[in-house]
């Protein structure tokens, strides 16, 4: 892949080779995105427009018990939230979904509002699934999960019933609230499964920076690295697309700037708003572009080792990029330039290496961990993590073919 210099205000733009395009691009059926300070004030109008009078609010224990932010959301709903479920569990275990769904049934909920990061958001979508398909026990999720057999056998069961309307209020940067898929952990198998249906798309998304000020710094920043991971793996995917490439490229440059500004001044609402919008951009359209090995490993590090998803990206991005380096052309040079590296005068290998190093440098500059040993993962877990990752459909579009469990273990050792 060649780099083409297109000079516009002194910028460098990567231009991938021309190739035939023929297909279908599916858009997220989301009606509105509200952003900026105080934007949550539009919540009542959104709930009214969707005929929601008695929503279940799904959030986290910390937000519900150690801040006054849930009260602000309740006030913004003007009485259209009828109950609060805050016993969500990181990586969304089946039991917590069943508990939330039972609360929704018992209160007669006619909608769901999620408030928080990836855990409340994925729990909310999982509750829609449980209600629509009348799932009332652990094994009920088995028939609804996506099943994948490497390299290309995929089964995506549709949701059978109608879903309640859902509205998402985000306090992190992982971006999952923008999608129509959710991950649910099977406690027995210790595997995080994917569930996918457009019916789970939020009717509206709120990116209000005032509601993010209580988010712990490590969580805000590491979830921003998850968004960086979305950008990099979509740009390097074997089924990358010009539409998502454009969004991801701009989002990556924004995240590199605004995550640093958030680190420098956590109260900077303008920087937080820009980071939030970059997160949304990083994941827009990704139902059409599958990702890669970093996400495949990350899902299972979460389910088996309880590592936060943003932290899995901090740890795994550089090793995966290194493993892929001979299979991405000059796309890692593109990443370097988007991260602010002047690649003029560098040879192709040096420029690509600069892309990998710029990502690791951002992780280090933000004070986040970047080795598996630093986040409590032991080498004894590698075989199980690798085997589970091979059953995640995102590995099928990794730029370097992932042909065996040994390939994944090799990357895990590099990350250790």
Image: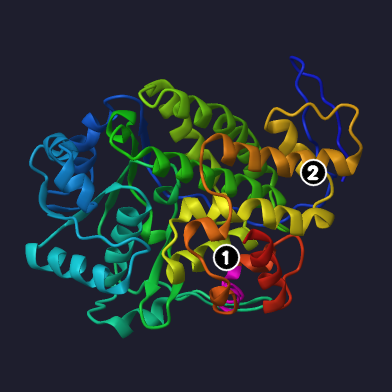
Q: Does the magenta stretch include residue 389?
A: yes
Q: What stretch is highlighted in magenta?
A: 385-393
Crowding around mark 2 (Cα neighbors within 10 Å: few <14, some 14 to 19, many 20+) is some
Q: Does the magenta stretch include residue 364?
A: no
Q: In which quarter of the image is the C terminus?
A: bottom right
Please give the name of the residue rendered at 11% of the width and 35% of the height, measured from the top-left corner.
75
Disc 1, SS = helix
Q: Is residue 381 left or right of residue 15?
A: left
Please give the name of the residue rendered at 35% of the width and 48% of the height, measured from the top-left corner.
117
Q: Where is residue 124 in the image (x, y as percent from the top left)?
A: 29, 58
Depth check, front residue: 188 or 47: 188
Please give the name of the residue rendered at 37% of the width and 71% of the height, measured from the top-left corner.
159
Of the image marks 2 and 1, the number of the one nearer the N terminus: 1
The residue tagged 1 is 297
Q: Position of residue 298 (x, y in %)?
A: 53, 61
Depth check, front residue: 76 or 366: 366
Residue 194 seen from this side: no
Q: Quadrant of residue 187?
A: bottom left
Crowding around mark 1 (Cα neighbors within 10 Å: few <14, some 14 to 19, many 20+) is many
Please give the name of the residue rendered at 60% of the width and 37% of the height, measured from the top-left corner.
362
């Amino acid at each position: 892949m060649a780099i083409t210099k297109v000079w516009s205000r002194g910028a460098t733009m990567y231009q991938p080779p021309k190739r035939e395009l023929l297909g279908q691009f599916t858009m997220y059926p989301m009606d509105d995105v509200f952003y900026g300070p105080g934007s949550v004030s539009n919540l009542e109008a959104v709930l009214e427009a969707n005929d929601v009078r008695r929503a279940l609010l799904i959030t986290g224990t910390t937000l519900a018990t150690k801040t006054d932010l849930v009260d602000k959301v309740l006030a913004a709903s003007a009485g259209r939230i009828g109950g609060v479920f805050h016993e969500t569990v990181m990586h969304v275990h089946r039991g917590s979904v069943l508990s939330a769904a039972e609360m929704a049934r018992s209160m007669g909920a006619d909608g769901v509002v999620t408030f928080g990061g990836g855990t409340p958001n994925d729990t909310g979508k999982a509750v829609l699934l449980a209600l629509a398909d009348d799932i009332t026990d652990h094994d009920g999720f088995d028939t609804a999960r996506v099943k994948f057999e490497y390299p290309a056998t995929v089964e995506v069961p549709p949701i059978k019933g109608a879903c309640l309307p859902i509205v998402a209020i985000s306090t992190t940067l992982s971006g999952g609230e923008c999608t129509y898929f959710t991950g649910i952990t099977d406690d027995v198998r210790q595997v995080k499964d994917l569930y996918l249906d457009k019916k789970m798309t939020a009717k509206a998304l709120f990116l209000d920076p005032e509601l993010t000020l209580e988010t712990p710094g490590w969580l805000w920043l590491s979830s921003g690295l998850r968004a960086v991971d979305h950008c990099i793996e979509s740009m390097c995917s074997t089924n990358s697309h010009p539409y998502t490439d454009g969004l991801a490229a701009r989002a990556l440059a924004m995240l590199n700037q605004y995550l640093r500004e958030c680190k420098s001044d956590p109260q900077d609402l303008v920087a937080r708003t820009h980071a939030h919008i970059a997160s949304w951009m990083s994941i827009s359209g990704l139902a059409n572009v599958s990702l890669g090995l970093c996400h495949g490993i990350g899902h299972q590090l979460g389910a088996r080792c309880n590592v936060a998803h943003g932290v899995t990206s901090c740890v795994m991005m550089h090793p995966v990029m290194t493993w892929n380096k001979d299979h991405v052309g000059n796309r890692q040079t593109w990443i370097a330039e988007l991260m602010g590296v002047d690649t003029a005068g560098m040879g192709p290998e040096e420029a690509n290496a600069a892309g990998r190093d710029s990502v690791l440098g951002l992780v280090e500059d933000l004070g986040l961990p970047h080795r598996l040993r630093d986040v409590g993962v032991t080498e004894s877990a590698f075989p199980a993590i690798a085997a589970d990752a091979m059953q995640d459909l995102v590995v099928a579009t990794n730029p370097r073919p992932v042909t065996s469990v040994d390939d994944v273990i090799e990357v895990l050792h590099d990350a250790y």
